Image: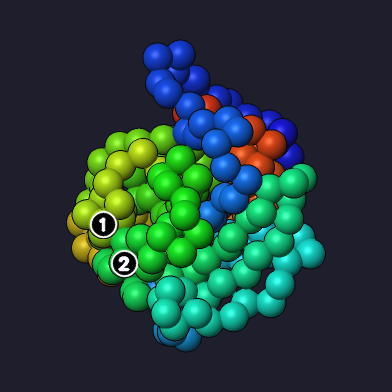
Amino acid sequence: MGLFDRQRTNYASSAPLYTVGRSKTLLVIGLGNVGAEYHRTRHNIGFAAVDRYKESQDFSDWVEKKDLQCYFSSGDVGGTRVILAKPTTFMNKSGEAVQKLQRFYRANNEDTLVIYDDLDVEFGTLRTRGQGGAAGHNGIKSLLSHIKDGFGRIRVGIGPKTHPNMDSADFVLQKFSDEQVENIPKLLREVSALIDERTAGPLIDSTIKVFQ
């Protein structure tokens, strides 16, 4: 149920992101870095996505859970308990927090949805996937190290780099351009719609053009 026109590429041979009916708890993890200096940077679009989803629902306020190494909020969506989390470990250790959350809630990878920035995807495009490599993303590298593959993903495009020869680490830690900032609400509303879809059933691997 998207809010905007979509161009989806579906892969019939791909397994769905989740197993229907396996659990009534869904972990939704937004990846990013804690600290004011990282606020609204490209690398923190995962944080922005779960912030936006929380605002759209009657969820609890963010609370820091030091034992779980994250900020935490929860609520009920259509009979599914949704746990939102923003790891406080910094990006390259995100897997530590996700592993602790899974153990605490007795959730597995099929019950876990991770939202993060992707430099290889054009800004304005979202991709949902159920597995894959890290593609150089330090947060995903950490997750693969701690919980292995098979967790759901919403990849939020932040590419291409402003200058092709620019260091990728420098680019992702910069803030979005003024034009992009104007379009981010549209992008995050579509991410929220995808989370809602997941609470009702499995997602499929897809590419969604929110805008050109």
Evaluate whether residue 181 shows in this view: no
Quarter of the picture containing the N terminus is top right
Nearer the observer, 204 or 181: 204
- Which residue occupies 36% across, 39% down? 150
Q: Residues within 10 Å of mark 1 (few under 14, many from 20)?
A: some
- Of pointers 1 and 2, the one earlier in the residue sequence: 2
Q: Amino acid at mark 2?
A: Glu
The front one of 130 and 34 is: 130
x 65%, y 65%: residue: 74
Residue 116 lies left or right of residue 139; in this view the side is right
Could you tell me if residue 58 is visible in this image? yes
Residue at 54 percent across and 55 percent down: it is 28
Badge 1 marks a residue whose secondary structure is helix
Quarter holding residue 124:
top right
Name the spot of residue 46 as percent of width and height, x first.
49, 60
For the residues labelled 1 and 2, say whether their Cβ atoms are less than 8 Å apart: yes
Above or below residue 24? Residue 37 is below
Disc 1 and disc 2: Cα gap in Å? 7 Å
Q: Residue at x 55, y 36 (%)?
A: 22
Q: Position of residue 192 (x, y in %)?
A: 66, 50
From the top left corner, tell me how far across and down residue 35 is, in percent: 43, 84
Q: Residues within 10 Å of mark 2 (few under 14, many from 20)?
A: many
x, y percent for residue 95: 32, 61
Q: Mark number for residue 123?
A: none
Disc assigned to residue 96: 2
Q: Residue furthest top?
A: 12
Q: Quadrant of the C terminus?
A: top right
Question: In the rendered image of this protein, does residue 128 appear above or below residue 59?
Answer: above
Residue 19 appears left or right of 173? right
Please state the total of marks drawn on the protein image.
2
Residue tagged 1? 146
- Looking at the rendered structure, the secondary structure element under dot 2 is helix
